[in-house]
Image (cartoon, rainbow, N blue to C red):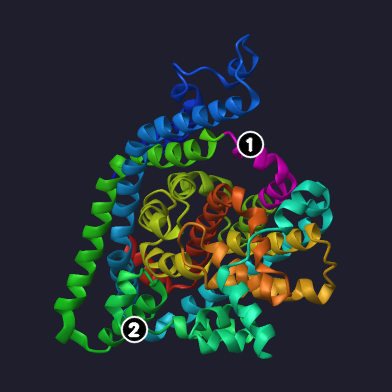
Amino acid sequence: MASKRGDHALTIQIAIAIVLAIVVAMLLPTIVSVGLDPVADIANRPDAPKPKDLADNIVAHQQTMVERANYVLIPLKLGGEIFLRILKMLVVPLVVASVMAGILGLGDVRKLGKPGLAAIGYYFATTVLAVIVGIILVNIMRPGIGVDESTKSKYSEAEVSKEAIVYENLAKETGLTDDKVAEVFGDHEYVEQKNMGVSRILENLTLMMFTDNLFKSAVNMQLLPLIVFSIAFAGLLTTMGTRVQAIIDFVGQMNEALMAFILLIMKLAPLGIFCLVAARFGQANILGTFFDELRKTGSYSLTVLAGLGVHAFVTLPAIFYFFTRRNPYRFMLQMSQALLTAFSTASSSATLPVTMESAVDEGGVSKKSVDFVLPLGATINMDGTALYEAVAAIFIAQVVGVDLSLLDQLVIAVTATLAAIGAAGIPEAGLVTMVIVLTAVGLDTQYISLILSVDWLLDRFRTTVNVFGDACGAAVVEKAFPEERLIASDD
């Protein structure tokens, strides 16, 4: 494994790469406008064109800037996408190998019960606490009340899908409900989206644990059924003795080889992360509308960030210290490489290889606990996502003037918790499950457009909180593993 000094140097390089990437993104409009007449000069010079011509010139000016920016962004997007794909390439084999290695290391599958219950209990408790923090803050800060009328009007007229309009019009003519019309056309997805209640979410979550095709699940990066299979298959191997020793040795060696591969890939991390962040921030900044949108939704963004901050710097550290008696903020610093990668990629699944490496080498967490807890956590432990969905739903209700009762907010809390568990560890997966939360309290899903402009940025912060929550979980659940096994695994 890499030395501690080497890991610290890499963390510093990643942090510098993020700062440089943001600086480049902020300077991008200036860089691509070299040689072009500023818009202000076009309008103010003595021979200024007529209003119509002026408008055409301004549009042409902006189009030229966008075209130039695309040339600059193409290599950045390409570099970032290659790095992200390399990380994602490792996720499926790493999850299968690490979970199986963790189970096989127990020696007896019956010893899985206590760590398993501890992990599930931790995930559920922290997710519920995150949602409670979000609901309290959004009710205190009331960010939706401060949105100006022009913004409300703009988003109130947000487009509804063409399918929804067709179904609603046919429903009026036929006397059927729009759900029945959709069924006639075979659009089951529309029906499921409209009728997604808590019971349906629970049903889907249960079905998500099982698959009829492991290879299909692997291709689609559906990690939960792969984890269930790995636990069941490795558990079976522990009962078969020396007859399967070759398979047990192979799984252990594969796990070690994948971790070594991760260390090799992380040498490219500063460059890959620079490309990822520069491309995403640069694209948002080039049209000059990002800061305007951020200003309009500033109160909402501040509420989400405040909630994430409370959960990351108060709730999780308190739980971490209570169970481990270790300094949580020192542990946060030890996990900084994984947290910076999470911020850059906005994907807890893509960050998983780095999280596992950091937790063992820097955080001092048992490899046995890391192998079992972190793959499961990257799939179902989404504290930041649950908090964000609760805040977003109540914010939208405040904007459109819907007064949510205590019961409605309780429904949001339960639905956000369950929906977050079902959210994939991919960028902006929260927007997909956001539909479920809004539908649960009767809010029109078209109002998701209220938060679209800043979601990509907030997604990075909530992913970082998700990853830190996973790492804390590995340290907490470590205590539930048999003591003698932990000592043996650390030798």
Q: What residue is pinned by disc 2?
A: 108
Is any atom of residue 4 visible in this view? Answer: no
Q: Let me know if residue 489 appears in the view.
A: yes
What is the x, y in percent for residue 389? 65, 63
- How many numbered marks have been drawn onto this rendered protein structure? 2
User: Where is mark 1, residue-wise?
Assistant: 291
Residue 2 rendering spot, x and y as whole percentages: 29, 44
Counting residues from the start of the chain, the first of labels 2 and 1 encountered is: 2
Question: What amino acid type is highlighted by mark number 1?
Answer: Phe
Name, please, the residue furthest toward the top: 46
Numbered disc 2: secondary structure: loop
User: x, y percentage for residue 378?
Assistant: 46, 64
Residue 70 vertical position relative to residue 245 in the rendered view, above or below: above
Q: Quadrant of the C terminus?
A: bottom left
Picture quarter containing residue 136?
bottom right
- From what the image shows, is residue 52 above or below residue 79? above
The secondary structure type at the circle numbered 1 is helix
Question: From which residue to which does the magenta span run?
Answer: 288-306
Residue 60 horizontal side relative to residue 161, left or right: left
Q: Nearer the viewer, residue 188 or 84?
A: 188
Q: Can you give x and y, in whole percent of width and height, for residue 176 in the image? A: 66, 90
Between 70 and 18, the one lying in front of the other is: 70
